[in-house]
Image: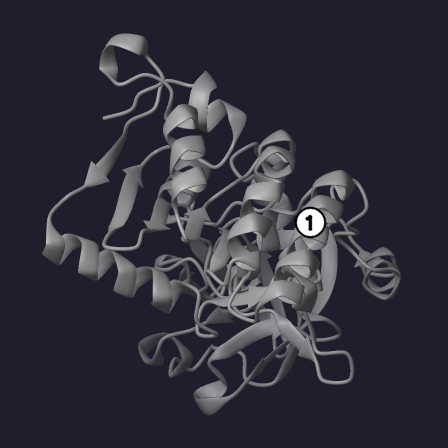
Amino acid sequence: MYTNIKKFGGDFRQILTKEFNSSKGVTIASGYASLDIINFYFPLFIRIAKSGGTSRLLLGMAFYEGLSQKKLDAISNLNRSLKQENDRSGVFVTNGRRYHGKVYLFDKNENSTLYVGSSNFSSSGTSGNIECTIPVFDSNQKDTLIEFLEDLYSPTYSITIDKAAVPIHGKKKLIVNKVSRIWKKLKKYNPQAHSIKNLPKIEIPLKRSVVNEKSNLNVYFGKGRLNRKTGIVKPRPWYEIEIIAPKYINSQNEYPKGDFLAYTDDGLIIPMRTQGDYFKNIRSKDSLQIFGIWLKGKLERAGVLQKYQPVTIGLLEEYGRDKLTLYKLEEGKFFMEF
């Protein structure tokens, strides 16, 4: 056990360096990495790849949370250098789901050593923080972990950093100009002008839209969009959302079918649309991001949602509402409350 406390195994950093220097292959899958660690182990990654071994690093949160320019430059350089040595090596990011685990695999001539725990591939993870990372000795568990790593590094979950448009901290625009212009042109009205007391209403539960990390309110965390001309995968827009109304909701007489105007509870008029089978997909008409700017924006302003954080059931409970409510004003017009 290595906790970065002397009497409980000491720093994991010392073990890392020892393993790098005695292994013919290295595979690391970590949520995060620090720039100083990348620079320190750079020549050791390269030495292993030059000797014909597999030398791989995966960062599980970078594609969705972004990196600093210096860190992106460093891992891009490492990736290029590794790929020049052999096509099994490189730096990867996950695409389709975030990965937050920490697994270290070192190949030896006769055996492999594996470590699993809480230590990110960073200075704080390997020496600064109090962590808990342990070696794996059971042969069945080792085989399963190696199989897991191979799956994690496969195209099902990962792409090399040169194929990913990783956001750069401070440079990523959450709302592109076209969407911003649509948002700014939305008409406004006085929400006090409408009384919703006796209006027919449709309550759309949101819990099923957040049951997993890449569901309808969290499409940002799904597979990125591939540019077929460049081969680069880009994360989907942060504010892109839609809501899926279940059959017992979209079959109600008052449920909107097709285009309608949503008069929001905070004074905006948003052109909306339902489409798909049984008109189950509820989305903003001119851009899927307009609906997200409004709904996610409410969660952000309430202080319960941070950028690049999934919307969860717990988060909705903290906000105090887990339903979107549509009150029918007249045909094609609804008061929208969240």
- Name which residue lies at 47% across and 50% down: 311
Residue 48 placed where, x, y %?
51, 52
Q: Quadrant of residue 261?
A: bottom right
In the image, residue 3 above or below residue 277: above
Which residue is painted at 82% across and 60% down in the image? 176
Looking at the image, residue 314 lies above or below residue 56: above
Farthest residue in the top direction?
Answer: 7
Pick whichever, 180 or 328, lies toward us: 180
Q: Visible in this render: residue 231?
A: yes
Whether residue 199 sits left or right of residue 2 in the image: it is right
Percent of width and height locating residue 71 = 70, 41
Instruction: For residue 234, say whether it is visible.
Output: no
- How many neighbours does mark 1 have within 10 angstroms: few (below 14), some (14-19), or many (20 or more)? some
Is 214 placed above or below 316 here? below
**Left or right of 15, for residue 254:** right
Residues 110 and 82: in front is: 110
Amino acid tagged 1: Pro
Q: Mark 1 = which residue?
A: 191
> In which quadrant of the rendered image does the N terminus lie?
top left
Foreground pick, 106 / 202? 106
User: What coloring was used for the rendering?
Assistant: one colour
Picture quarter containing residue 22? top left
Classify mark 1: helix, strand or loop: helix
Which quadrant would residue 250 be assigned to in this image? bottom left
Q: Position of residue 322 (x, y in %)?
A: 40, 50
> In the image, what residue occupies the spot 60% across and 85% down?
258
Across and down, in percent, residue 217 comes to: 51, 60
